[in-house]
Amino acid sequence: MNADQNMKSFFFLLLCATSVFAAETPSQRADTIFVNGDFYLFSCPASNAGLSCLLVKNGGADAGVFVRTPRAAALAVFDGRVVEVGKNEEVKALAGLRTNVVDLHGAFVMPGFNDAHNHLWSGGLEMQHVDLTSATSLEDMQARIATKAKETPAGAWMEGRGWDHTKWKDQRLPSRQDIDAVTGSHPAFFPRIDGHIGVANSAALKFAGIDRNTPDPQGGKIDRDASGEPTGILRATAKEALQAKIPEPTIAERSTAVELALAEAARWGLTSIQEPPVNPQDASEWKYFLIYEELENEGKLTARITEWLPFNAPVNVLRAHRAHHANDDLMLHTGVLKGYLDGSLGSRTAALLSPYADDPKNTGIVYHQQDELNQMTIERVRAGFGITFHAIGDRAFTMALNAFEAAANDMKQRHVAMEKLPPFHSFRIEHAQVTNPELLKRAADLELIMSMQPSHLLTDMNWAEQRLGPERAKNSYAWKSALENKLPLAFGTDYPVEPLTPFRGIYAAITRKNEAGTKEYYPQEKLTIDQAVAAYTSGSAFADFSDHDKGTLAPGMLADFVVLDRDITKVAPEEILKTKVLRTVVGGKTVYEAK
Ligand SMILES: [Zn+2]
């Protein structure tokens, strides 16, 4: 079937669905009507289910074919859901006396972004810290810290991350004396951009009991000057030991963090967020779930949140947390379990099948043994949980596949069909940065969901090939290969590791170039704009079991969409980076509007 025929059958099916819906609800009118828009209704990879995407599939689109839908000018909302899309006159006919009519003045509209991997609250905490990411010199870093010190209550800790001395003129590491000069009596600690080393001031070292007599901890280092005194620079476990002593944020600080981050998310057009636990040790996600719950009760939750639970937690605790809140609440619920299998490529802790090209004795680290991992996976799948693993290297990916295969075999032996499992059942992977054709085939047999973050490439392309060597680099960040294996693709940012903006990820996905456009990374894995948009909308929804409610704009779907200042499907890729969100709509309600 050619594209034209596809389109015709699609039109037909969409019409059928629309009229069936209308016939069932003849008295229904609209609360709000958005007119004079340029609605890009959806883009679907064939592997996604979903109401609208199913129509495409049944309409005969070949597997792997993406269908870009015709545009609509107007959209009507009733009770949070789309009731009609079409021409202005058709949709206006649904207006009643109390219908609110919003004129979009011709602007481009698309389904709201669903960030499939976003540490929102962690970003919110960082927003309250000093931002050192763009500090151009030690003096600049000091000036930023000094400004923040003035508004920090006496004796309170100061934090902030992101400095990078390799970008400064003399490339000297900062010292505790440099920090003392601007922090006064505040204990202070500032991790470097990579997160593996940091600089503490004298008050922080004193608080943590680190002095000239403190030995280096195993796996870490306390840098010392010529006289043997600590310089303030702490590496790896020495850094972690100090960080463990920084007091936890109060509930009020956590709450502020979430509210700040939600406002930013709305400003970037994120209507849904899937939030993983922060690291293998962190168990604070439940504190944040309760904060989201409170915000929801107060009517302040402006994005739909799926809060994942930690894979390592005991099954009885996981069950209790899942049962705590209605799982069919469309604004907030718990999601899959996330386990950590390895570290990161940048720090050479991602687990590789053969050694790092730039570190021939090192194959990275793993957090689990295979047998133990299989047992834990089987136990949790039996309890009806969906599972995802952080797996960056190909060895971690292999371990994830082994564990999922063990769980799938266990289900087969017990004659449990995949389809009959609870809705939270799924096998999913986070990052999957280093793959190979054989692993992708195994993943396809398991119907594994690939949750990837294209914006990571913009950071990682500076050293990824050094770490991996050309052969493996060719198979890294392999978005297109994933789709060619019919693996569902879900996109996110990993905020605050990468910025919150979805446009950076879309740009990375379709160009595989750095932001300046001067460097390209294995362009054969580029996606089309429709594929990238699908991964960020219908694909993310599929990965979150919500593709029947979200990710596409069609009658019956949630009215979650975003109005942009340009048509990202038509402008030059570098223009996408400059996109501004004009309006963000969640459930038919405007949660952000540009001034
Ligand atoms: Zn993450």
Image (cartoon, helix red, strand yellow):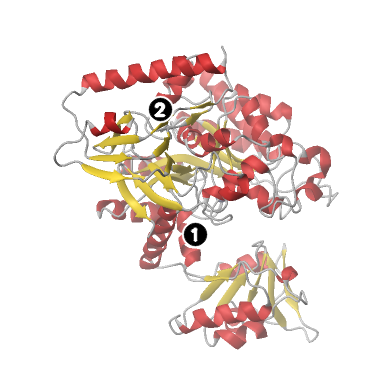
Pinpoint residue 272: horizontal percent, then vertical percent. 42, 44
Pinpoint residue 19: horizontal percent, then vertical percent. 29, 19
Mark 2 Cβ inside 8 Å of ligand 1? no
Q: In the picture, residue 530 is in which quadrant?
A: top right
Pinpoint residue 24: horizontal percent, then vertical percent. 22, 20
Q: Nearer the viewer, residue 158 or 568?
A: 568
Q: Secondary structure at mark 1?
A: helix
Pinpoint residue 536: horizontal percent, then vertical percent. 51, 39
Q: Is residue 577 above or below residue 89?
A: below
Q: Nearer the viewer, residue 7 or 584?
A: 7
Residue type for callout 1: Gly
**Does residue 58 appear left or right of residue 302 in this picture?**
right
Q: Which mark is residue 422?
A: 2
Mark 1 Cβ inside 8 Å of ligand 1? no
Quarter of the image with the N terminus in it: top right
Residue assigned mark 1: 123
Q: Secondary structure at mark 2?
A: loop
Could you classify mark 2 by the number of other residues whose Cα lies within 10 Å: few (under 14), some (14-19), or many (20 or more)? few
Could you classify mark 1 by the number of other residues whose Cα lies within 10 Å: few (under 14), some (14-19), or many (20 or more)? many
Q: In the picture, residue 175 is in which quadrant?
A: bottom right
Q: Nearer the viewer, residue 576 or 149?
A: 576
In three-dimensional space, the C-alpha distance between marks 1 and 2, rounded to whole angstroms, equals: 32 Å
